[in-house]
Amino acid sequence: NIIKLRHQRAQILGYHTHVDFITESLLSKSADSVFDFLISLSSMLVESSNKERERLLYYKQKECRKNGIKFFPIINSYDLEYYKKIVEENDFSIDDNLLKQYFPLQHVTEKMLEIYAFFFHV
């Protein structure tokens, strides 16, 4: 019933759909522009995820060759974190142990709890 009422209100006000009515006040201005944005974003994300997948497979293949293991071009869920770690270390020179010194556990925990308390009014 609420869906019908929203649709009727939108049409009375001169909008094609309720989504058009709601999105006009946003930057998008119409449901079509939101849809176009999501399609554009989707294609960029697919391209990016494919590149990331290829990077992970490259390191998996390299490791399989090194250890004499047959390579299957699949990243299993249980392998994902392992190969992501290898990519971080090799491609981005990220050292977790070095980063840890800048984020002491006690301090990070306290600050996270402060943020949660702020957002949840605790």
Image (tube, helix red, strand yellow):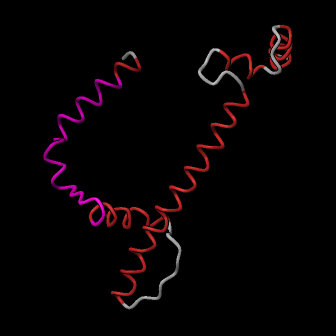
Residue 115 horizontal/vertical position (percent): 32, 25
| Position of residue 95 in the picture relative to residue 7 (left or right) | left
Residue 112 horizontal/vertical position (percent): 29, 31
Q: Is residue 70 or residue 116 the one in the foreground?
A: 70
Task: Say if the magenta span includes residue 104.
Answer: yes
Residue at 47%, 88% (x, y): give it.
70
Instruction: Residue at the far left: name it.
Output: 101
Q: On screen, 60 above or below 29?
A: below
Instruction: Residue at the far bottom: name it.
Output: 68
Please identify the quadrant where the N terminus is shown: top right
Q: Quadrant of residue 58?
A: bottom left
Residue at 45%, 66% (x, y): give it.
78
Residue at 15%, 43% (x, y): give it.
102
Q: On screen, 102 above or below 94?
A: above
Residue at 22%, 30% (x, y): give it.
110
Q: Is residue 8 or residue 35 the one in the foreground?
A: 35
| Position of residue 6 in the picture relative to residue 90 (left or right) | right
| Position of residue 64 in the picture relative to residue 4 (left or right) | left
Residue 15 horizontal/vertical position (percent): 80, 16
Q: Quadrant of residue 118?
A: top left
Q: Is residue 2 or residue 40 the one in the foreground?
A: 40
Q: Which residues are magenta?
A: 90-116
Task: Say if the magenta span includes residue 105.
Answer: yes
Main structural element of the magenta stretch: helix, strand or loop?
helix
Residue 108 horizontal/vertical position (percent): 22, 36
